[in-house]
Amino acid sequence: MRKLLFEGLFQSPLTEPPPAAEAVAAFDLAGRLDRAARRRLGRSLAIRHVDVGSCNGCELELHALGNAFYDLERFGLRFVASPRHADVLMVTGPMCKNMGEALERTWRATPDPKWVIAVGDCAVDGGVFAGGYACHGGIAALVPVDLQLRGCPPQPLDLLAGLLNLIEENAR
Amino acid sequence: MAIDCIPQALKLRRDRRWWRATVDDGLWQETAAGLAAGRWTLISLWGEAEGVRMALADEAYGEIGVVSLPCPERRFPSVGRQHPPALRLERAARDLFGLEADGAPDHRPWLDHGRWGVRYPLGLAKPDSAATPYEFLPVQGEGVHQIPVGPIHAGIIEPGHFRFSVNGETVVRLEQRLGYVHKGIEGLMAGTDPVSAVRLAGRASGDSTVAFALAFCQAGEAAMGIDVPRRAVWLRALMAELERLANHFGDIGAICNDAAFAILQARFALLREEVLRAAADCFGHRLMMDRILPGGTAVDLPADGPRRLARLVEMVRRQLPRLVELYENTASLKGRTVGTGLLSPELARRFGAGGYIGRASGRQIDARLHPGYPPYDQLTFEVPVLNSGDVNARVWVRISEVEQSLGLVEQILGALPDGPTRGEAAAGQGEQAAEGGALVEGFRGDIFVWLRLGGDGRVERCHLRDPSWFQWPLLEAAIEGNIVADFPLCNKSFNCSYSGQDG
Ligand code: SF4
């Protein structure tokens, strides 16, 4: 282990430069938060992920945000275990009816001010799963959505750009 | 051969290594008894419009048979009564098709949580209203208390409910309740053309998108008797091995992380990322979704692809030995993984556990070899098998499989045939309905697909069986007697798919 740690001292970092805020086009960012709330949240956001029926592809890329290439935490963004600690809900999946109650309860447990991000085509409009008996076809059927991040799954850099946009908007 | 009820079967068809038989109640029960006696392994059990079916393999997985039982009364003799691995599949067949398993010891719903507004959506559907509370199995004993967890867990994970009954720190019983991410994939597939259906199949479990798409296509190609261009066959295997590498790296790192050893998690996450980037460069998608299509592949390897992948293999070969050495030599880590979450070879065999879970508990199985599919008959690799059945064994099987997959990638690159990557997929127009099956080795284990195409070339019925169906119940067994704090570690070492089992 010493060898590995020692090497780390001399390696240049693998971390990607931050994506430009405009790297992701067409943000549908509703101005729901008032100024006071924005100031209170500052530039650091706590994120709670909720899977409401994802194929688990979106989770894999959310996970990737934590690796040394994307290193989410350098931006003051971190995943938390409880909705009660969260500012942002990142929701994946086509809104399976079997997850309806769980998402509503999570949303209610998240203190205001809060944002909801629909992550992936499924969360936005149901994606390939729209139209069946088991899904609502997008999370907007149950909770208000502030930001949509399309993709199947969205790539980590797109997820990062989306989150940075949210912070910028928040800090303005 | 091994199926001794064949001569009595009412109807029998045989193609390649798959046989099919239509049976009556008596033969159905005989077959169930054969499963219980360990003569065959249950591959799946599923509902159809006209009845229930099951797929089974002989001991060597040399032959796979599909047994159909017509159920005009919408009932059939329970297989789960004799052979518990069938229980959850029977509950699912009831929830989706309204097919009742007579004599089953467990009649609770499985996928249907009373939220769809409809009952038996794939059978004789009828409107449904209220959700009834789910009854967990009773647990008795002095000092036993319960810890309910989920459906939402603390982390970036899929949802499901775990009900722990614990005595002090020790887990006396774990009961799972799944079905939260049921998307109705099999229902959505019905009536679609195969190119749309493969998109759905590739999203049954996103981490196995290549393997699921491959299994779906193989089943369709078997049904239609379509030959796939050789280059496409090899490219498919290349993608499948890259998918295996990426997932094994992710898993090994995550297991170390759950044993509180973060540096290996960080290192393996980088290896995973490197594989995904190479996949994106070579095939245009990090997870290689929608890259396999009926009749071939959607993309060809670009001119610099072989060099790109050779660099990846070389980089992994350089880094891996030291990470493995660190895993092996860190006592605090081994102290957590050795002897934890034991799965006995006997249970693994009974449940037909696939993948690293089966192979870490003594099962000499690999669908790439048995029943087998090309190009693996022309490639050289070993199937690592261990007997200790603990978390450490499941880590080590993954490590060995990584080494084998690196060799396979090199062999494929060295012998990749030239030619087209997609044949005339023109799905036999104007022909009769045709059925076919496939068993494909995903990173997690064998994926089974049974597909019936109508005369118009559209999907009439498709059944997808993720390996997790038989692995989830084994996790319940493996955690028994462990401390609650070791559950994340055991769970990660299994890494079952919620989406794959929920459908
Ligand atoms: S958007 Fe795509 S990757 Fe994400 S959950 Fe849906 S199907 Fe899976």
Image: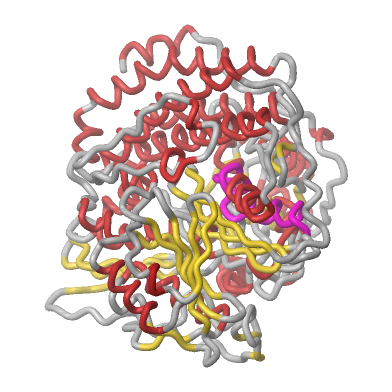
Q: Say if B492 sits above or below B311 in the image.
A: below
The C terminus of chain B sits in image quarter? bottom right
At 70% from the left and 68% from the top, the residue drawn is B460
Task: Classify residue B127 as left or right of residue B41.
Answer: right
* Residue B446, position as x, y percentages in the image: 45, 49
Highlighted range, magenta: B193-213
* Residue B73, position as x, y percentages in the image: 52, 92
Q: Does the rendering let one see residue A138?
A: no
* B200 within the magenta span: yes
Residue B211 lies in what quarter of the image? top right
At 44% from the left and 76% from the top, the residue drawn is B90
Protein image colouring: secondary structure
Task: Classify residue A63 as left or right of residue A116.
Answer: left
Q: Nearer the viewer, residue B296 or B165?
A: B296
* B101 within the magenta span: no
Residue B423 lies in what quarter of the image? top right
Q: Say if B21 sits above or below B212 in the image.
A: below
Task: Classify residue A57 as left or right of residue B80.
Answer: right
At 63% from the left and 78% from the top, the residue drawn is B122
Q: Nearer the viewer, residue B55 or B332?
A: B55
The N terminus of chain B sits in image quarter? bottom left
Q: Does the rendering let one see residue B218?
A: yes
Badge count: 0
Q: In the current view of this chain or complex, which residue is farthest to the top?
A: A10
Q: In the current view of this chain or complex, which residue is farthest to the front?
A: B7
- Magenta stretch secondary structure, dominant: helix
* Residue B395, position as x, y percentages in the image: 32, 36
Q: Nearer the viewer, residue B486 or A165?
A: B486
* Residue B25, position as x, y percentages in the image: 40, 84
